[in-house]
């Protein structure tokens, strides 16, 4: 997966927006104003890309035990966020599944009103 494929995959999800809230390097994808995926553009340029993705604490622990390319979230709440390295033992298919899980987890945390607005605007 390259940065363009990541970009297109994230933006293909309902109501996703892109932001640079911290600096000009950290690309953040949000749904309903909440982050679900972060990545460093400089790390992509250096050939060491990674993503920060939200997950459930129990599943995060399991993933970290199973994959060397999944670590506690860099600069994030370590129980709720993982850093997933590309070019590791984590396949692109698995990365896409983890992005979707992160998106779904954040979407479900939104108020019912915001969820309904997103669903209505996409139809």
Image (cartoon, rainbow, N blue to C red):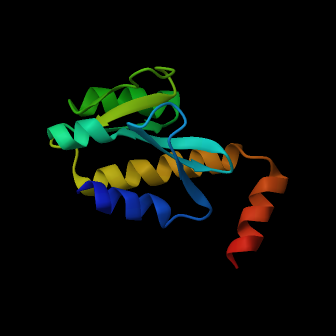
* Residue 109, image quadrant: top right
* Quadrant (top left, top right, bottom left, bottom right) of the C terminus: bottom right
Q: Does the rendering let one see residue 89?
A: no
**So how many labels did they put on this image?**
0
Quadrant where the N terminus sits is bottom left
Q: Nearer the viewer, residue 94 or 22?
A: 22
Specify whether residue 108 is in view.
yes
Give me the residue at 78% from left, 54% from top.
Answer: 114
- Residue at 49% across, 37% down: 55
Q: Residue most toward the bottom?
A: 123
Seen in the image, is 10 located left or right of residue 122?
A: left
**In-front residue for pair 87/59:** 87
Residue 77 location (% of width, % of height): 51, 21
Q: Position of residue 8 (x, y in %)?
A: 39, 64
Q: Is residue 49 left or right of residue 22?
A: left
Question: Residue visible at 23% across and 43% down?
Answer: 44
């Amino acid at each position: 997966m390259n940065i363009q494929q990541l970009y297109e995959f994230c933006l293909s999800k309902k109501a996703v927006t892109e932001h640079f809230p911290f600096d000009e390097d950290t690309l953040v994808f949000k749904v309903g104003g909440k982050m679900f995926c972060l990545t460093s553009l400089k790390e992509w340029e250096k050939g060491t890309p990674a993503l920060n993705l939200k997950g459930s604490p129990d599943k995060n622990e399991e993933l970290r035990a199973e994959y060397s390319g999944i670590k506690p979230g860099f600069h994030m709440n370590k129980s709720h966020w993982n850093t997933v390295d590309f070019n590791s033992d984590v396949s692109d298919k698995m990365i896409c599944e983890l992005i979707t899980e992160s998106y779904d987890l954040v979407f479900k945390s939104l108020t019912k009103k915001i969820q309904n607005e997103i669903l209505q605007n996409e139809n």
